[in-house]
Image: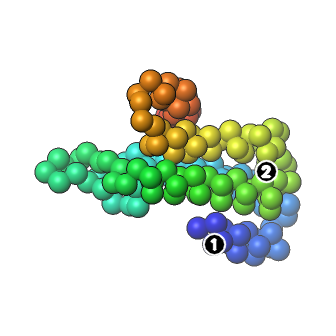
Amino acid sequence: AMHTLEDYFSHLSEWLPNYYFAKIVRHTFEKLVQKYLDACFTFGNYNRFAAASKGKKGQAHFEDSLRAAQSLSNDRLAIVECFRINYAKEMEMAGVKGGIEEIEERVEILKAMSHLLLLTSPKEARDDIIIMMRELDIQNG
């Protein structure tokens, strides 16, 4: 997905004024994060993280916690690297004043989800759950 966005952005940057291109980059970043989280938390969604539980329609679970944690971590890094390295100037122009820190903070939930999948004790989950609840609260407005 990131390579497709980079290709798409390379064409748009040639055709659009900087102001509008920056707005598209920021909007794309926000929508990408939102849709990624929607896919992770949508029950019955057959993606690489969640699969419908047999006999329990509407419920989902992470099939392989180690693989799911690694995918979440890799995807988080790919998103941060793409928008931090290639589009930091546009993100700042479009209102992301915190720069790199704000971009990383916005996808911190993926790091928390990854960590949560690898925990062995529920007592260790407190901080990750707080991060996830804060982000879900932001998503639901």
Q: Mark on residue 91?
A: 2
* Up/down of 76 relative to 136, above or below: below
Residue 95 seen by the camera: no
* Up/down of 121 relative to 88, above or below: above
Query: Exactly how many numbered labels are in the figure?
Result: 2
* Up/down of 114 relative to 19, above or below: above
Q: Mark on residue 4?
A: 1
Task: From the viewer's perspective, tell me whether residue 42 is left or right of residue 132.
Answer: left
Look at label 1 and name its amino acid: Thr
Query: Residue 140 location in percent, x, y?
Result: 49, 34
Q: Mark on residue 139?
A: none
Element type where label 2 sits in the image: helix
Task: From the viewer's perspective, tell me whether residue 82 is left or right of residue 92.
Answer: left
Element type where label 1 sits in the image: helix
Q: Residue at x 52, y 41 (%)?
A: 115
Q: Residue at x 72, y 60 (%)?
A: 82
Quadrant position of the N terminus in the picture: bottom right
How far apart in space, not on screen, are marks 1 and 2 (Cα)? 18 Å
Query: Residue 20 location in percent, x, y?
Result: 78, 58
Residue 12's image quarter? bottom right
Residue extending furthest left? 55
Look at label 2 and name its amino acid: Met
